[in-house]
Each structure stands twice: as C-alpha cells, then as structure tokens.
Image: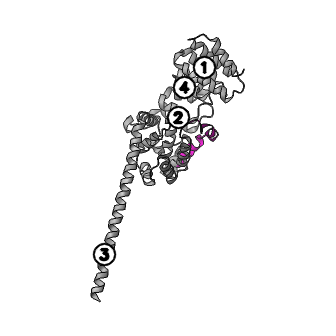
Amino acid sequence: MSSSDFRQIAIRTEAGKAERLFRAAVSAFCSLTRPSRREIAQLEDLTLPLFDEVSVESRRYVAAALSECEYAPTALVRRLAEEPVEIAAPLLTRSNALSDIDLIALIGRHGLPHARAIARRKELNPTIADLIRALERPTLVKTRPPETVTKLTLRPEPVAKADADRAAPGEAVENARRRLRSMMRLAGDATDVNTFLGQPAYVKLRETALTGNAAFFQTALADALEIDFATARSVTGQSGYAALLAALRALDLSEDRAFLIAVAVYPGEFPHPQAIRLFLDRYRLLHREAALDKVRAWKAEALSRAVRDKADDTINTERRDASNGDDASSGLKAS
C-alpha cells in the first residue's frame, strides 16, 4: 500500500467521521512493510489533529496496533503513551518508539500504573527497573514531602548492595553516570538534529554533562547562554539544581532533555520517582520568560562585576604610581 492510499481513505471518509478515519489510517499504515519517512509524517499529520475527537475504544485499538509496528510514528506513540494505562499499556510494554528517557519521564508524570506496565518490557534498562522497584515498595525508601525532596541518597543496585554500601560517594556518582551513558541511543541523534530547535546546543550540553568533568559542562553552558565562565560555574556550583533549571528552561529544552542533563549534573538529587516528578513539575511551571529574565540578571551582574573589577584595578594602579612617585621624591631629597 502506497502513501496515496492514505489520501484515498480521507476522500472516502465522510466529513466528521473522525473515528473511522483515525482507525483506517493506522490500519493502512500498519500494513506497510517498510514505511518511508514521508508516510510516517503523513500518518502523524492525519491522526494527531483527530486525537481529541476519537473515543477511548479507538485510542485503545490504535495503541494495540502500533505496539506491534516496527516503524511506529514517534509523536503519535508518545501522545498515546500519555493516556491512562488502560489505553497505553501495549505501547508501554512493547513499543520500540519509546526511548529510555521517554519511559523515565512517563514514570515521573504518571507514577505506579505506568511504571508497572513498563516493568514488563523485555531487556528493561537496570536504572529504570530500579526506579520502578522503589516506586513499588516506597516503604523501603526514605521519602520527604514534595517541596523538600532534594537531598536523598542514591539507592544501590540490589545485586551489589554490600559493595555499594562500602563505596565512596564519588564512586556512587560515577556509577550513576555510567548508567546514564548506557541509556543514550547514539543512533537516534542524527535523526533528531533537524527536528528539535536548539539541538546542537543540547547535544553539547548532554555530552559534556555525561563526561563528569564540571569544567567541560560549564564551558558548554556558558557558550549556550552566552554568559561568562564564572557565571556558568556559579550556576552549577550550587547545592541544588534551581539555577540550572532556570538555565535549561531559558534554552527552551523539552522537559525530558532538561531532566537528563540535570540528573547527569546532580545525580544525587534523583534517587526516587517522587524527586523526578518534582523536577518535571517545577520545570513545567517555570515560564520561559521568567527563566530568560534570570539569565539577563546573570549577564547584568557579570557586567557590573567586570566594571567594578576594572575600577578597582585602575584605583590600585594609581595608588602604586603615586607610591612610586613618593618614593622617588624621598630618594632625591635624601641625596
């Protein structure tokens, strides 16, 4: 079946029959052995505008159909994955269109119901499995009210609990970074470059954050925000991620990408799904214009500091010159 079949479906369907068009388009797409990018884009253009008009039964049908589809359209799958678990379960359990970062974000937003479905995935990333175990058994994890969940300790891997208990804090942080590196799918980077605004800056921030070298990340952050290195260092040198959250929001990164960078820079802040949800809620509620105002304030402070430093240097130079002149005059009088 070619892409022209999609147009024929739309033509044959009577006006207002969103339900029939929604199901028929997905069924036709799933019959394609190897759909092209154009056909994938056409399906998304056709179905996403109809999404709010179709019934729960149609959404459940489409979710089940796409869960078995090797080349399912990512945008439509992500939209369906945000539905209640009764609809999203097939995709959460099987779909390859959902990345590890997508899964973490879904757990943070929807909690235990989505987490249980995700737990049934084959070859689930160990970090995600650990988060789900913590959510399943919250009594085993020390929790605090949402507004104070910032300083929890990294939970060790169950298979190596004894060794992890003896590990130094630096080793625990490095282990977290290694798990994060395993979650990155480099094959998907090239396809995303022209899809998301600001992607080159995101890639640079992500890769430098995952090196574990603070100076590398601070340099990338300074370049992305067009601020000086000292300001970038102060943003990431704080005990919490509040300043970094504003910086990432000013760059207009999606919440899952912002979360990945934040957890790479502050791994100790996100040992539990409740902490992940808190970050996502704070990021979602932070207006971008407010974040941009914060960055402008940083730039103004840096400029003011540079002016003060220059003025101090000038005063010190004049004092040294005056002191040298006085010493020279004293020498002449003595001779």
Q: Secondary structure at mark 4?
A: helix
Task: Name the residue: 58% across, 44% down.
Answer: 181
Asked if marks 3 and 1 touch (Cβ < 8 Å), the reply is no
- Of the residues tagged 3 and 2, which is closer to the observer? 3
Cα gap from disc 1 to disc 2, whole angstroms: 23 Å
Which tag, 1 or 2, sits closer to the chain's start? Answer: 1
**Horizontal and vertical percent for residue 39?**
66, 25
Other-residue count near label 1 (Cα within 10 Å), few / some / many at <14 / 14–19 / ≥20: many
Determine if the magenta segment contains residue 260: no
Does residue 288 appear anywhere in the picture? yes
Cα gap from disc 4 to disc 3, whole angstroms: 73 Å
Q: Which residues are magenta?
A: 174-198
- Of the residues tagged 3 and 1, which is closer to the observer? 3
Determine if the magenta segment contains residue 182: yes
The number of numbered badges drawn on the structure is 4
Q: Identify the amino acid type marked 2.
A: Ile
**Horizontal and vertical percent for residue 267?**
48, 44
* Quarter occupied by the C terminus: bottom left
> Which residue corresponds to mark 3?
323
> Which residue corresponds to mark 1?
62
Cα gap from disc 3 to disc 1, whole angstroms: 84 Å
Q: Secondary structure at mark 1?
A: helix
Which numbered disc covers residue 104?
2
